[in-house]
Image (cartoon, grey):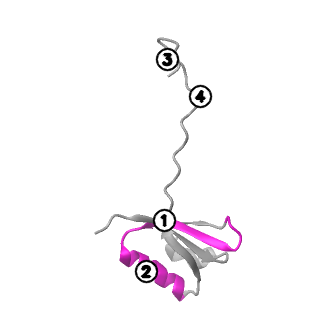
Amino acid sequence: MTDPTAYELVLRGRVSARLLRPLLDDFTVDHARAGTTRLVGRVTDPCHLHGVLAHLTSVGIELVSLGPAAPPLRPAPSTDSQPDPSTGAHP
């Protein structure tokens, strides 16, 4: 058994939620870029990935790209540090 892997699938066109309904539990949908739909989610194993691709093919959705999703960006450290109450010094 392999560890789940985050994947990004880019689909041609603005794909409706109705067509993506079977995938919505596992993927987030993004229509931010004109002319494409982006799905990002964890795929548990090769069978899961093949099932996702089979669904997309069965409803006639064109896959533009498929690959590992970029890791999320870590938030920048806070610049609003509070002084240590006992010394008054900033960390």
Q: Could you classify mark 2 by the number of other residues whose Cα lies within 10 Å: few (under 14), some (14-19), or many (20 or more)?
A: few
Stretch in magenta: 32-58
Residue 35 position (above or below residue 3) = below
The numbered mark, 1 or 3, whose residue comes first in the sequence reads 1
Front-most of 22 and 45? 45
Is residue 54 inside the magenta stretch? yes
Q: Helix, strand, or loop for circle 4?
A: loop
Residue tagged 3:
84
Q: x%, y% of residue 18? A: 60, 77
Label 1 vs label 4: CA separation?
Answer: 33 Å
Snapshot quadrant of residue 15: bottom right
Label 2 vs label 1: CA separation?
Answer: 14 Å
Q: Are marks 1 and 3 in contact (CB under 8 Å)?
A: no
Q: Helix, strand, or loop for circle 2?
A: helix
Label 1 vs label 3: CA separation?
Answer: 41 Å
Label 4 vs label 3: CA separation?
Answer: 13 Å
Q: Helix, strand, or loop for circle 3?
A: loop
Residue tagged 2:
51
Front-most of 46 and 58? 46
Q: x%, y% of residue 7? A: 48, 67
Residue occupying the far right of the picture: 34
The numbered mark, 2 or 3, whose residue comes first in the sequence reads 2
Residue occupying the far left of the picture: 1
Q: Could you classify mark 1 by the number of other residues whose Cα lies within 10 Å: few (under 14), some (14-19), or many (20 or more)?
A: many
Q: x%, y% of residue 85? A: 50, 14
Label 2 vs label 3: CA separation?
Answer: 54 Å
Residue 61 position (above or below residue 75) = below
Q: Is residue 29 left or right of residue 87?
A: right
What amino acid type is highlighted by mark number 4? Asp
Residue 16 position (above or below residue 83) = below
